[in-house]
Image (cartoon, rainbow, N blue to C red):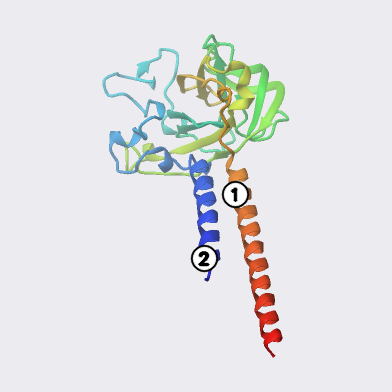
Amino acid sequence: MKRPTHRYARTLIATALFAIANAASAYTIDGQIADWGVTHTGHNSDWTPNSGVQYAVSDQNNEALSGGYVVNFTQIGDLGYGDQPYDAEAVYLDYDSTYLYFAVVTGRPENVSQWPSGDVAFDFGSDGSYEFGLETRGNNGFAKGDLVQVSNWTNGYYYPNPNNVAEITSGTVVSNNSFVYGSLINDIGAYTGSSDDDHYVLEGRIALSDFSLYAGQNFTIHWTMGCGNDEIHLASTLPNAPPPPPSGEVPIPGTGLLFGSALIGWTVHRRRQQGLGATTQAVQTGETGSAS
């Protein structure tokens, strides 16, 4: 009887690849915003992300308030008005079992000579301490994407509120991470067809293990540009560390192990089939020889 060797192999490999695809289907770090659920239809609802994503939006002015920029829809008296290039518009935050993902949307392009982007700040305990920052430009001896345990920040130049930290000046590098300062995108929100529709996305991910000492704690993510003209922030809670499996329960294997096991299983199965084929052929040959 012919055994379905190839069908068995295809099933094993397809199962392993499906597991890998599921594990890698979170966010693509490319400076785009569509995978967060943010759309490009020219309506205020564009800013609303996928269900489960934590976010804060402060696109240009809240029409219910007058004058100046707003922060998370709350008017801040000491922040100035500088048009779209000085606008902090939105921040998005999400997690999977391995990473913290973030996206900051601003009207500030990356390569400007005056008052460039600040760094993304993380304040554990939400007490104004800002223990960590992610370097967005590659400045002060740090590489773009470096997660830094910060010893000194500069504040926004014109609006030096101590809670408006802008740029990492010294600290210890913890890790380097996937991070992109995206190129121009348009048609988000209600200001399409004008310079107020110029948007740039700072997108990155950080391993939760880098924040392991703060698992389960409240924190604030914050961003502003060098002048401190506008800022955006969002409060969240870091996930707890994954608990160990209950006693006597076998932990679920990682996707790499699943794929490797599938290949090993297919190889063993294939060799067994080849061995059985060779044995059968030898027996048939022997039977033919004895009859002659």
> Of residues 240 and 258, which is closer to you in this image?
258
Tag 1 residue: 259
Which quadrant of the structure image shows residue 188? Answer: top left
Asked if residue 283 is positioned above or below residue 84 in the image, the reply reads: below
Q: CA distance from mark 2 to mark 1?
A: 20 Å
Q: Residue furthest top?
A: 127
Residue 15 visible, this angle: yes
Residue 156 visible in the current orientation: no
The residue wearing badge 2 is 4
Q: Amino acid at mark 2?
A: Pro
In this view, the residue farthest toward the bottom is 292
Q: Please tell me whether mark 2 sits on a helix, a strand or a loop.
A: loop
Q: Quadrant of residue 34?
A: top left
The residue closer to the viewer here, 8 or 258, is 8
Q: Who's the residue at 48% across and 39% down the image?
A: 26
Q: Residue at x 62, y 53 (%)?
A: 265
- Neighbour tally class for label 1: few under 14, some 14-19, many 20 plus, Cα within 10 Å: many
Q: Which residue is at 53% across, 51% downward?
A: 17
Q: Which mark is residue 86?
A: none
Q: Position of residue 212 (x, y in %)?
A: 62, 21
Report x, y in % for residue 53.
41, 30
Residue 131 at x, y percent in the picture = 62, 16
- Identify the mark nearer the N-term, 2 or 1: 2
Q: Is residue 40 above or below residue 247?
A: below
Image-based side of 208 in relation to 39, left or right: right
Q: Amino acid at mark 1?
A: Phe
Q: Nearer the viewer, residue 13 or 63?
A: 13
* Residue found at x 59% / y 16%: 214
Q: How many marks?
A: 2
Apparent side of residue 176 relative to residue 247 in the rendered image (left or right): right
Image location of residue 162, percent across then percent down:
55, 11
Q: Secondary structure at mark 1?
A: helix
